[in-house]
Image (cartoon, grey):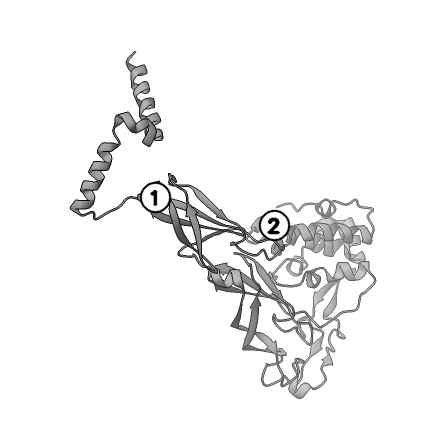
């Protein structure tokens, strides 16, 4: 299959200088990087192609060979070293684009220290804990600094030697014909360092797996999918690099009484039809205890009573939500004979002549039904 022109891949002209090449690469690589397109195979393949084009055109010797011979100049051996392999989604973008940012800002010093990965811990709270705040003790498995070697990776913290094969650069130049190819040093695996005496505890990695116990303070008012960032509580850095961060993601369990929407709380309050008809006072629940509300006479099912300031205190502002109680009129069940007789008498008193006064909604509905069928027969 014919490969696409490298200049067209990076959307630059053949006269572009190194700075323009780096700028174009940075823009495209940030757009198609797999961390920004999880599960998108097309973006991953696009990223491979962009990286391959950049590595050819940024190198003067490789660019010269490409300009003269095209893709055939690299048919032997190059493509295997330019593809995207496997980036951890938590990796720092500076690890990927270090060559671009370093060259642009004039900092070409290779840094063996790497930042540790960020971690995420999902924590489940009940509604009361989320609204009022709570302290939670959690235990997370992570890679932490090996104290036996102080994170260096060598036995008793001995000094690490620079790789003699690549002079500590992590890269080797292999001459092929009239141009050279840069490859990862196979002796040190690109680290630029050799540990003669690896630490017995961490096997030279500088980190060990262990359970880390943390007390997390959950502030009042958190909601589903909120995240709390704990700086430097992620995995330890490599070779003395800075720690990653820990993100606590909030999940709130379903409540038996309340539903939360933003900072308001909602609940259904069942009342009997006598109370709805005659009116009275009832007690409704809140997260801070019981509240009395007055039910006016002739209250209909579905009426909402709003109680100001009895919702959730917003974590992002000083506002407090409301409690909204929806009245649901309950039909009585398991009636005894006396109760049934009372209802029969009540029903008889609510005859057709008094329907307009006692049941106006029913009157309007059945009048509408009658008109509907009369229109059908006319």
| Left or right position of 105 against 323 | right
Q: Nearer the viewer, residue 362 or 86?
A: 362
Question: Residue 304 appears at what percent x and percent y?
Answer: 45, 43
**Residue designated by label 2:** 43
Q: Secondary structure at mark 2?
A: helix
Residue occupying the point 35% across, 29% down: 360
Vertical comparison of 48 with 118: above or below = above
The circle drawn on residue 7 is none
Vertical comparison of 112 with 295: above or below = below
Residue 88 showing in the rendered view: no
Q: Secondary structure at mark 1?
A: strand
Question: Residue 40 appears at what percent x and percent y?
Answer: 56, 50
| Left or right position of 70 against 127 | right
Res 192 quadrant in image: bottom right
Q: Nearer the viewer, mark 1 or mark 2?
A: 1
**Residue designated by label 1:** 329
Question: Residue 128 appears at what percent x and percent y?
Answer: 48, 62
Residue occupying the point 59% across, 63% down: 228
Residue occupying the point 70% across, 50% down: 28
């Amino acid at each position: 299959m014919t490969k696409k022109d490298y200049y067209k891949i990076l959307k630059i002209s053949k006269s572009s200088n190194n700075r323009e090449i780096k700028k174009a690469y940075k823009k495209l690589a940030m757009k198609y990087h797999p961390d920004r397109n999880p599960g998108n195979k097309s973006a991953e393949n696009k990223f491979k192609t962009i990286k391959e084009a950049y590595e050819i055109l940024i190198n003067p010797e490789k660019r010269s060979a490409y300009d003269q011979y095209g893709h055939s100049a690299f048919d032997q051996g190059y493509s295997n070293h330019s593809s995207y392999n496997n980036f951890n989604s938590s990796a720092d973008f500076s690890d990927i684009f270090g060559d671009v940012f370093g060259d642009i800002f004039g900092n070409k010093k290779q840094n063996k220290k790497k930042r540790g990965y960020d971690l995420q811990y999902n924590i489940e709270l009940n509604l009361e804990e989320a609204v009022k705040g709570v302290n939670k003790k959690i235990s997370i498995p992570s890679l932490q600094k090996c104290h036996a070697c102080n994170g260096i990776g060598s036995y008793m913290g001995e000094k690490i030697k620079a790789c003699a094969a690549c002079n500590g650069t992590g890269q080797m130049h292999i001459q092929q014909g009239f141009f050279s190819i840069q490859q990862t040093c196979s002796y040190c695996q690109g680290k630029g360092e050799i540990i003669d005496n690896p630490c017995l505890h961490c096997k030279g990695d500088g980190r060990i797996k262990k359970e880390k116990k943390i007390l997390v303070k959950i502030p009042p008012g958190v909601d589903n999918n909120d995240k709390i960032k704990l700086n430097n509580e992620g995995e330890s850095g490599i070779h003395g690099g800075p720690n990653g961060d820990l993100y606590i993601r909030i999940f709130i369990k379903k409540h038996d009484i309340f539903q939360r929407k933003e900072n308001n709380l909602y609940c259904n309050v069942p009342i009997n039809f006598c109370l709805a008809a005659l009116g009275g006072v009832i007690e409704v629940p809140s997260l801070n205890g019981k509240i009395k509300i007055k039910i006016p006479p002739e209250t209909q099912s579905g009426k909402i009573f709003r109680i100001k300031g009895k919702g959730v205190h917003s974590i992002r502002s000083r506002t407090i939500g409301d409690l909204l109680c929806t009245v649901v009129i309950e039909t009585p069940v398991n009636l005894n004979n006396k109760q049934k007789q009372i209802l029969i008498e009540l029903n008889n008193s609510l005859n057709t002549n008094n329907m307009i006064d006692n049941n106006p909604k029913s009157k309007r509905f059945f009048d509408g039904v009658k008109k509907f069928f009369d229109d059908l027969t006319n």
